[in-house]
Amino acid sequence: VSNCLERHFFSRPTVKVAKDLVGMKIVRRLDRGGIAERLSGTIVETEAYGGPEDEASHARMGPTARNAVMFGQVGRAYVYFTYGTHFCVNISARTLRQKAGAVLIRAIEPLEGVEAMKLHRTCTELHSLASGPGKLTQAMKIGLDLNGADMTDPRSALFIERGISGKSVVSTPRIGISRATEKRWRFIDPSSTSISRKARINVR
DNA sequence: CGCTCGATATTCT
DNA sequence: GAATATCGAGCGA
């Protein structure tokens, strides 16, 4: 039996899915020259992004080549390249009523494959290894090749497993955006030491 | 500690 | 041309 989250988990309002993903585990399967390697971490910070009605969302202009996953089947990886240097990873999630939606994974606490992640990042400190959306994609080797990957399949290169439920979750405004800043659609585990630096400021 | 700024490709105006 | 769902170095306190 697998602990992998199933499709129906992501067929719910994007904001609810974002909140419920805090405490779950993201798993990356790598094939290092024939040797299987598993990298994973507990999700400690997420953000919800909606469809055309959300002014801060990539989907606000309607479907395009980049944001297509946000309008498609739920439970798939939406990976994009930003600031000319970084990748960010989301999971598509929405109800039938919502035109588009995805949850940005902003930070994780590393669990498995910590040494490999340190090599990918040229970083030795655990608390800064994956404490940001660009950091965790680098640590887990997540790039555009994973865009569209089915994250509800445990044989996939990237998927979500059930974690500890019942942890407290705090909501705050989203980070790094200039529109729709009044929506409190960022969710964090306040007890974690691996949330992004900007995020920590808002908790205090 | 906190703030500013440069890097650097894709997307938007 | 400007903005961007970011990061880390460099600087001042």
Image (tube, coloured by chain):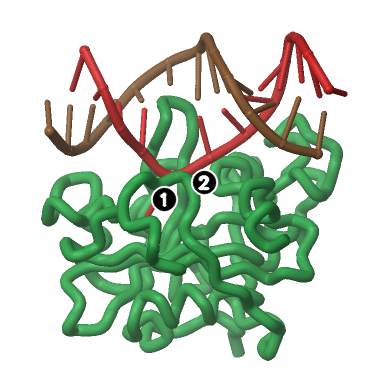
Chain colours: A green, B brown, C red
Depth check, front residue: A55 or A33: A55
Q: Is residue A66 left or right of residue A11?
A: left
**Percent x, y of residue A173:** 48, 61
Classify A53 as above or below A22. above
Q: Which residue is painted at 74% across and 56% down in the image?
A: A194
Taking A22 as reference, is C5 above or below it? above
**Which residue sits at x=66%, y=76%?**
A23
Amino acid type indicated by mark 2: Ile
Res A37 seen here:
no
Is A127 placed above or below A22 here?
Answer: above
Q: What residue type is labelled 1?
A: Leu
Chain of the residue that carries numbered disc 2 in the rendered image: A
At horizontal 34% and vertical 67% (from top left) the residue drawn is A92
Looking at the image, residue A115 lies above or below residue A195: above
Report if residue A55 is visible in the image: yes
Mark 2 is surrounded, within 10 Å at the Cα level, by few (under 14), some (14 to 19) or many (20 or more) other residues, namely: some
Rendered residue at 50%/82% (across/down): A5
Element class at badge 2:
loop
Rendering quarter of residue A83: top left
Residue A181 picture location, percent across and down: 39, 56
Estimate the x, y position of residue A72 in percent, counting from the top left: 21, 67
Which quarter of the rendering shows the N terminus of chain A? bottom right
Q: Disc number at residue A146?
A: 1
Tell me: A123 left or right of A73.
right
The residue tagged 2 is A142
Mark 1 element type: helix
Measuring from the top left, give residue A147's x and y in whole percent. 36, 51
Q: For the residue carrying disc 1, how many other residues have a C-alpha within 10 Å: few (<14), some (14-19), or many (20+)? A: some
Give me the C-alpha separation between circle 1 and circle 2.
7 Å
Quarter of the image containing the C terminus of chain A? bottom right
Q: Do the residues labelled 1 and 2 touch (CB within 8 Å)?
A: yes
Hey, which quadrant is residue A95 in on the image?
bottom left
